[in-house]
Image (cartoon, coloured by chain):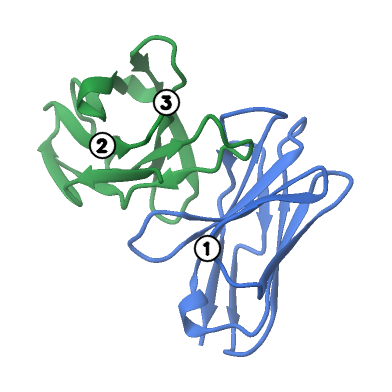
Amino acid sequence: ETGVTQSPTHLIKTRGQQVTLRCSSQSGHNTVSWYQQALGQGPQFIFQYYREEENGRGNFPPRFSGLQFPNYSSELNVNALELDDSALYLCASSRPQGNTIYFGEGSWLTVV
Amino acid sequence: AQSVTQLGSHVSVSEGALVLLRCNYSSSVPPYLFWYVQYPNQGLQLLLKYTSAATLVKGINGFEAEFKKSETSFHLTKPSAHMSDAAEYFCAVSDRRDSSYKLIFGSGTRLLVRP
């Protein structure tokens, strides 16, 4: 149990739709990162939020966007869903200046 | 750019046998290194990490890993495998100069434990 909670755990969307995934970070952690894990692959870094600002972004298109709220919780939004967006989306949190990242259980997204 | 290579997408051992999962990294400066475990349909759990202290790092569940700079390796070992160790294992690297400490993962190694 890492204290990082994500919702929903599973969802199915249609190609072209939009989705919002949510994450609550561990207590005391002000940094939240999002990763995409396609089936059979390692996770890939999408972006990170620190103090409500984006602090680093991976190789993902602009239709992947995010928010961080004053309580450090976060959202990942994906617009214009494509079939290849089907994956496990992992949220992770860390302490200020912390080099250890703790992951949630993930949200499984299926795009049909 | 940093990268991680995990040799062997699948490793099969007998219960009680030595577990050895291989990880090699590429980085221009000594990185932070991590091993995570992922059980079916679950998120990632941190097993252990190397952040420039002792080169032999002990983690949870009896696992340990040794940082070898000359070999750019960070292999994961466990003296005696248990059935409960069956899972996917990921090696990851992060750049200590990057304030985001974002993780770059290998492609994973699935550990199978035979009774």
Q: Residue furthest top?
A: B54
Q: Earlier in the sequence, mark 2 or mark 3?
A: 2
Callout in the foreground (1, 3): 1
Chain letter of disc 2 in the image: B
Assess disc 1: are there few (<14), some (14-19) or many (≥20) residues with their C-alpha within 10 Å of its C-alpha.
few
Residue drawn 56% across the image and 67% down it: A60
Q: Which chain is tinted green?
A: B
Does residue B88 show up?
no
- Under circle 1, the secondary element is loop
Does residue A69 appear to the left or right of B45 in the view shown?
right
User: Residue B45: image x %, image y %?
Assistant: 47, 38
Residue positioned 20% across, 52% down in the render: B9
Q: Which chain is blue?
A: A
- In this view, A57 is above or below A85: above
Neighbour tally class for label 3: few under 14, some 14-19, many 20 plus, Cα within 10 Å: many
Q: Amino acid at mark 3?
A: Leu
Q: Chain of mark 1?
A: A
* Badge 1 vs badge 2, beta-carbon distance below 8 Å: no
- The residue singled out by tag 2 in the image is B23
Name the residue rendered at 63%, 36% in the picture: B99
Amino acid carrying label 1: it is: Asn
Measure how far apart labels 1 and 3 are at the Cα level: 27 Å
Q: How many numbered discs?
A: 3
The CA span between labels 2 and 3 is: 13 Å
The chain containing the residue under callout 3 comes to B
Q: Which mark is residue A59?
A: 1
Which residue occupies 77% across, 30% down? A28
Determine whether, in the image, residue A84 is placed left or right of residue A33: left
Q: Mark 3 — residue?
A: B48
Front: mark 1 or 2: 1
Which is in the foreground here, disc 2 or disc 3? 2
